[in-house]
């Protein structure tokens, strides 16, 4: 029994000398001494070996030892609120929590959603289609038959296994699929990603985003096209933005026109962005070519229509003054954070 008393005294000295520098150390102390397999329980188990005539004496000693350990643990626990788990710094539990960073939509998504919202208010429905497209829907149906010189306007990514399939060069292929399944009246916009074999630079990329529109009904005129696009420009860029149309050429529209707006950077006075003309081109448009209508069994004598298409990157460039297309796809958080709260 004397050996047990010496062991208890040794434990007391060890406990008295113990100091906890971290909250983890306090927890380890509890496990070592007061845990289900701790030393206090082991010492208490020695009561079965104490002679009956000394059990009362040793019972008191063991209870005092247990109380001594518990008191030490309480003291350590009270001090642990100012301890850290990694010995680095004190924790002030009254401080507010770390702020949670807010996410944001990508600037191209913000602008695309704005474009879609504007045309939805004019009654346009949203139509989508596949990014891997066949030659007919991408070219043939849009009045671009094989060997047509206008195909050279778009450097195309073809699928090696089957040259009849390609990555769509414009979302006009979605218009083709809509006309294939739906009879007039048709009023849709077609947002989506398109691909062209371009050298990547600040002004060009091998993929970009378009929003194209199509309206087919009886008695649709070029005046309807102009008023639709006037409304879009004023809603997107402001009431003071000026608009002009210039004659152009697209195989799937006749007549065709490109639309410019007064430069938002210089206010029309002339700068590097507008090449000192005061005007910036933002989209192409025109009346749907009768042959395109006939490709889908739409009577071109009864129905007319207009179509337009714009690059989302160009609109985003003008709206947010982004001059390098590569920024849109580099996922630089410093760039993307600028659009937090934009929409």
Image: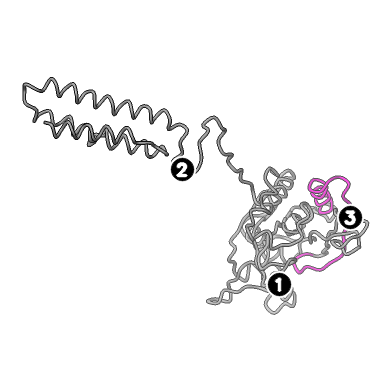
Count of number-bearing discs:
3
Whichever of labels 1 and 3 marks the residue nearer the N terminus, that label is 1
Whether 205 is among the magenta residues is no
Mark 1–mark 3 Cα distance, whole angstroms, equals 31 Å
The residue segment tinted magenta is: 225-253
**Nearer to the camera, 232 or 301:** 232
Whether 226 is among the magenta residues is yes
- In this rendering, which labeled residue sits more in front, label 1 or label 2? 2
- The residue at the point 15 percent across, 33 percent down is 4
- The residue at the point 81 percent across, 54 percent down is 225
**Nearer to the camera, 12 or 244:** 12
Q: What residue would you read off at disc 2?
A: 87
**Quadrant position of the N terminus in the picture:** top left
Q: Is residue 151 above or below residue 38?
A: below
Percent across and percent down for residue 341 are: 68, 42
- In this rendering, which labeled residue sits more in front, label 1 or label 3? 3
Place residue 176 in its image quadrant. Answer: bottom right
- The residue at the point 81 percent across, 52 percent down is 229
- Badge 1 local density, few (<14 within 10 Å), some, or many (20+)? few
Q: What residue would you read off at disc 3?
A: 266
Asked whether disc 1 touches disc 3, contact meaning CB atoms under 8 Å apart, the reply is no
- The residue at the point 65 percent across, 64 percent down is 194
Percent across and percent down for residue 309 are: 74, 59
Q: What residue would you read off at disc 1?
A: 154
Furthest residue toward bottom: 147
């Amino acid at each position: 029994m004397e050996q047990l008393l010496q062991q208890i005294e040794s434990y007391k000295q060890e406990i008295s000398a113990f100091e906890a520098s971290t909250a983890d150390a306090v927890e380890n102390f509890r496990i070592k001494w007061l845990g289900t397999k701790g030393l206090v329980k082991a010492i208490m188990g020695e009561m079965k070996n104490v002679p009956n005539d000394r059990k009362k004496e040793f019972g008191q000693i063991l209870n005092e030892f247990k109380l001594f350990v518990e008191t030490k643990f309480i003291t350590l626990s009270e001090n642990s609120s100012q301890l850290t788990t990694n010995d680095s710094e004190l924790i002030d539990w009254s401080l507010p929590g770390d702020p949670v960073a807010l996410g944001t939509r990508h600037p191209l998504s913000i602008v695309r959603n704005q474009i879609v919202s504007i045309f939805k208010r004019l009654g346009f429905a949203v139509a989508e289609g596949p990014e891997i497209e066949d030659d007919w829907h991408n070219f043939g149906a849009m009045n671009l038959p094989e060997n047509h010189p206008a195909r050279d306007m778009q450097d195309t990514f073809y699928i090696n296994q089957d040259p009849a399939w390609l990555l769509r060069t414009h979302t006009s292929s979605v218009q083709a699929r809509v006309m294939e399944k739906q009879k007039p009246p048709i009023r849709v916009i077609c947002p989506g990603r398109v691909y062209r074999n371009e050298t990547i630079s600040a002004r060009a990329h091998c993929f970009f985003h378009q929003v194209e529109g199509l309206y087919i009904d009886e008695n649709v005129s070029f005046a309807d096209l102009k008023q639709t696009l006037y409304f879009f420009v004023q809603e997107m860029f402001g009431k003071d933005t000026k608009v002009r149309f210039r004659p152009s050429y697209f195989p799937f529209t006749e007549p065709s026109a490109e639309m410019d707006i007064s430069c938002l950077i210089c206010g029309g006075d002339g700068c590097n962005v507008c090449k000192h003309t005061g005007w910036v081109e933002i989209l192409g448009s025109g009346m749907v070519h009768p042959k395109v209508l006939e490709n889908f069994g739409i009577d071109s004598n009864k129905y007319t229509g207009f179509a337009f298409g714009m690059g989302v990157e160009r609109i985003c460039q003008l709206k947010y003054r982004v001059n390098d297309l590569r920024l849109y796809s580099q996922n630089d958080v410093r760039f993307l954070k600028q659009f937090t709260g934009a929409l």
